[in-house]
Amino acid sequence: MDAKYINPFINSVSGVFASLGLGEIATGNIFRKETFICRYNLTTILGISGSINGNVALSMPYDTAKKIASAMMMGMDVTEIDEMSVSALGELTNMICGQAATEFSLQNLVAEITPPTIIHGDNMKVIISQVETTAVELSSLLGSIELNLGLEI
Amino acid sequence: MKGVKLMIVDDSPAIHVIIERAAIANGYEVCAHAKNGDEAVKLYESTRPDVITMDITMPVKDGLTASKEILAQNPCAKILMLSAMGDEEIVKEAKDIGITHFMKKPFKGEDIVNAINNMILGETGE
Ligand SMILES: [Mg+2]
């Protein structure tokens, strides 16, 4: 996938983390997946349509998800993934993809986003679509996050 | 700033927590929580908050419609509208109906508190 489609998402994760006071993001490996599959405990999925079509997912271990939700909610105790933490992680995903959509609009690309869906469980393996997917390993102070872009361009 | 009565309007429970925690840490009183515009209009009448944080996209009744109804009850109501990416058109309409304070998501709790302090002090800001 062309970097011009990947970079807005990486930038928006960093930008949103900074705005929320969640610390810096370091970009690790970028690799291809034959299908859109996520294996961490918790995955937030959001659809994109317009000039860019497909799905974006943030996949992370429970530990990361709880720490992010807690940090977003001003240090509130998050011991399990409940309605409140799902709401926080949904907002986070919305903000990240909204920010990316704004970057795309500066390149005259339309990207409309759907509300996010969040699924979680032990031994998760979520197959989201058959579209070839670009995965980006991101590390933050709160743990690792895998950004997945399954986009038809 | 002590004693400010705040109503939080948002369909996302996490946003209520973020704003409430920051508000309480600053000595505000959160007098009402509404999860859609319909609840907001009703709770505005019964609790008369000093300031309202108003989400835009919500089920049942959106934030722009609710703001219009609240401003019809009290043209001096202080509304801080929380906008997301893609809300630019709605923000324009909100300005047309007299809303002067906006906060773009993503925000931290302290950003909201600073904005509210400015509203109370009568400064204009976005
Ligand atoms: Mg909303």
Image (tube, rainbow, N blue to C red):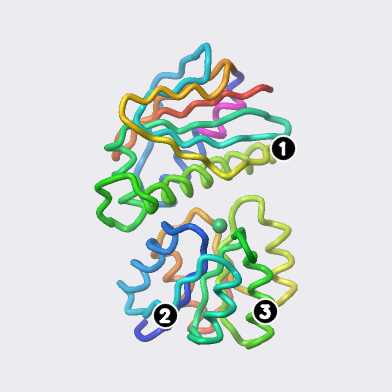
Mark 3 beta carbon near ligand 1 (under 8 Å): no
Judge from the rendering whether residue B62 lies leftward or rightward of residue B13; answer left or right.
right
Point out the quarter of the image occupied by ligand 1.
Answer: bottom right
Please give the name of the residue rendered at 57% of the width and 21% of the height, measured from the top-left corner.
Answer: A129
Judge from the rendering whether residue B51 lies leftward or rightward of residue B1; answer left or right.
right
Q: Which residue is mark 1?
A: A110
Q: Which residue is mark 2?
A: B31
Q: Secondary structure at mark 2?
A: strand
Eyeballing the image, is B38 above or below B31? Answer: above
Q: Amino acid at mark 1?
A: Val
Q: Amino acid at mark 3?
A: Glu
Estimate how packed mark 1 is, as few (under 14), some (14 to 19) or many (20 or more) residues with alpha carbons within 10 Å: some
Please give the name of the residue rendered at 30% of the width and 35% of the height, measured from the top-left corner.
Answer: A143
Marks 2 and 3, Cα distance to the nearest angstrom? 19 Å
Q: Which residue is mark 3?
A: B69
Q: Secondary structure at mark 3?
A: helix
The quadrant of the picture occupied by the N terminus of chain A is top right
